[in-house]
């Protein structure tokens, strides 16, 4: 696709070579009509050539659910993103050097994170850490989240514009991550940095070279290894590192498997919630009548939170690899091929969701979206993410009439993380 054309028309392109996995489309916010065409004309579509190699696109809601719950024929073990490295293609100089390209890809999909595993190993490793978001723990976290949200909101400037992503979205989620890991609070922004390094390939604004990227990820491993060693020597506690260090299925992990699971937990707890926080502010600007609804009836806030997560879809896709030949919606997918479930497209599928392109805080069955995945790999922290968003919006409504977006958002260059680098806003306090 020629992104020199600011408004490429998907209906003028050859469907045989149609490639929706172009991060420039997502960065420009132009991906919606491309998915609309695929849903209507080729819901199970084969792209023979892309920066990520050949792949199949699954774009309808019910087809995505069918793939996501069939972990026997659609395996996670081959990798969970279309191309590794956070869903962005390698820079040209890296693409042309196979050794460097492989090194970069291994920095994401090559690690032994449990989301990139199939049962039974997936099940036992996931079970080791799910206790951190068990209902009793969530109940005890709410007071902490509320006090932090209040402190963050009260410290914001009232008479000037600022970047909501940095001051609110990143700060709140990073503080929560630090709590979940029992990570030194003064170093919490390291977690944000490592998340960005893990999901952004070299030369795309975070790490300049594969070597620099690898060095930062090894710094992450070294830092957490020290925490691991400290926790392993004492009685188990209720934080993620202690759970991993004492878990029967995780305490003997190899270093790169440990790092893979760390990156999974960091990215899962950071990028997804932070981009839903920013997406909610943008949605309220694009649909101001919906803000009036929750002002009139704050009982709608939990439903609104689910709608924000659907509307934003902070992880645009997940990938599987076929273990056998599979026929899906009339198309034969051969064993060993890459299959991409476009959650973003499924969440916009009018066959499953009424007025799917609209943002409606009172939507019926709003929680029946695909943003958390489906089946055994459904996001284990979904209730925590929802709680953070709910508490934040309860505190926002106590303080502000409106959060005005004053400049076009700066979006991420990625087919995986659907998020924001910057969202300039100005606050309008309650009268």
Image (cartoon, rainbow, N blue to C red):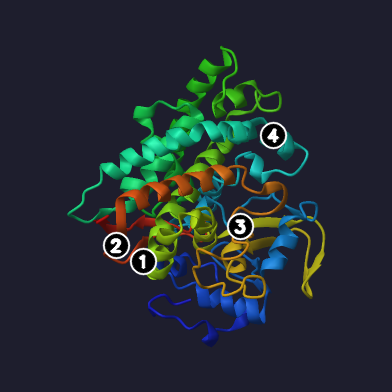
Q: State the image coordinates of residue 53 (x, y, percent, origin top left).
A: 60, 63
Instruction: In the rendered view, tell whether residue 399 sits above or below residue 402.
Output: above
Q: Is residue 98 above or below residue 267?
A: below
What crowding class fits label 2: few (fewer than 14 Cα within 10 Å), some (14-19), or many (20 or more)? Answer: some
Q: Which mark is residue 404?
A: 2
Q: CA distance from mark 4 to mark 1?
A: 40 Å
Do the CB atoms of the residues marked 3 and 2 lie less than 8 Å apart?
Answer: no
Which residue is at 27% across, 55% downward? 430
Dot placed on the residue nearer the N-terminal end, 4 or 2: 4
Spatial CA distance of label 3 from label 1 is 22 Å
Q: Is tag 3's residue or tag 1's residue first in the polypeptide sequence?
A: 1
Evaluate if marks 4 and 2 touch, with contact meaning CB atoms under 8 Å apart: no
Q: Point out the image quarter for the C terminus.
A: bottom left
Please say if the residues under marks 4 and 1 sit with CB atoms less than 8 Å apart.
no
What element does badge 1 sit on?
A: helix
- Indicate which label's residue lies in the foreground, 3 or 4: 3
Which label was assigned to residue 208? Answer: none
Pick whichever, 270 or 24, lies toward us.
Answer: 270
Question: Contact, CB < 8 Å: mark 2 with mark 1?
Answer: yes
| Residue on which the image places disc 4 | 127
Alpha carbons under labels 3 and 4: distance apart: 23 Å
Question: Which residue position holds label 1?
Answer: 285
Q: Secondary structure at mark 4?
A: helix
Q: Estimate the spatial distance between the alpha carbons at disc 2 and disc 1, rounded to whole Å.
A: 7 Å
**Mark earlier in primary sequence (3, 4):** 4
């Amino acid at each position: 696709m020629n992104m020199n054309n600011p408004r490429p028309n998907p209906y003028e392109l050859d469907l045989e070579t149609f490639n929706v996995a172009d991060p420039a489309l997502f960065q420009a916010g132009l991906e919606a009509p491309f998915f609309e065409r695929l849903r209507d004309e080729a819901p199970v579509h084969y792209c023979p050539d892309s920066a990520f190699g050949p792949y199949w696109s699954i774009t309808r809601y019910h087809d995505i659910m069918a793939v996501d719950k069939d972990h026997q024929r659609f395996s996670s073990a081959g990798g969970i993103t279309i191309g590794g490295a956070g869903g962005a293609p390698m820079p040209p100089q890296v693409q042309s050097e196979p050794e460097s390209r492989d090194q970069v890809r291994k920095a994401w999909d090559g690690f032994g994170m449990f989301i990139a595993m199939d049962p039974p190993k997936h099940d036992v490793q996931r079970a080791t850490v799910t206790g951190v978001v068990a209902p009793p723990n969530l109940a005890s976290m709410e007071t902490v989240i509320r006090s932090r949200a209040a402190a963050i909101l009260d410290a914001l400037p009232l008479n000037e514009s600022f970047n909501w992503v940095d001051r609110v979205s990143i700060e709140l989620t990073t503080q929560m991550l630090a709590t979940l890991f029992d990570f030194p609070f003064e170093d919490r922004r390291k977690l944000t940095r490592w998340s960005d390094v893990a999901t952004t390939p070299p030369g795309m604004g975070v790490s300049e070279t594969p070597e620099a990227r690898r060095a930062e990820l090894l710094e992450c491993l070294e830092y957490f290894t020290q925490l691991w060693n400290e926790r392993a020597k004492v009685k188990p506690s209720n934080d993620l590192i202690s759970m991993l260090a004492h878990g029967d299925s995780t305490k003997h992990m190899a270093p790169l498997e440990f790092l893979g699971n760390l990156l999974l937990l960091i990215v899962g707890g950071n990028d997804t919630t932070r981009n839903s926080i920013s997406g909610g502010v943008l949605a309220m600007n694009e649909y101001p009548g919906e803000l009036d609804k929750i002002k009139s009836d704050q009982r709608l806030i939990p439903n609104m939170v689910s709608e924000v997560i659907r509307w934003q879809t902070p992880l645009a896709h997940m990938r599987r690899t076929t273990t056998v030949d599979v026929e899906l919606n009339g198309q034969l997918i051969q064993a060993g091929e890459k299959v991409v479930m476009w959650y973003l497209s499924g969440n916009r599928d009018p066959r499953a969701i009424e007025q799917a392109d609209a943002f409606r805080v009172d939507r019926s069955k709003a929680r029946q979206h695909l943003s958390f995945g489906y089946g055994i790999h459904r996001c284990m922290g979904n209730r925590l993410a929802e709680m953070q968003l709910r508490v934040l919006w309860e505190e926002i409504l106590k303080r502000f009439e409106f959060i005005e977006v004053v400049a076009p958002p700066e979006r991420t260059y990625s087919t995986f993380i659907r998020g924001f680098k910057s969202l300039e806003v100005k606050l309008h306090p309650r009268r």
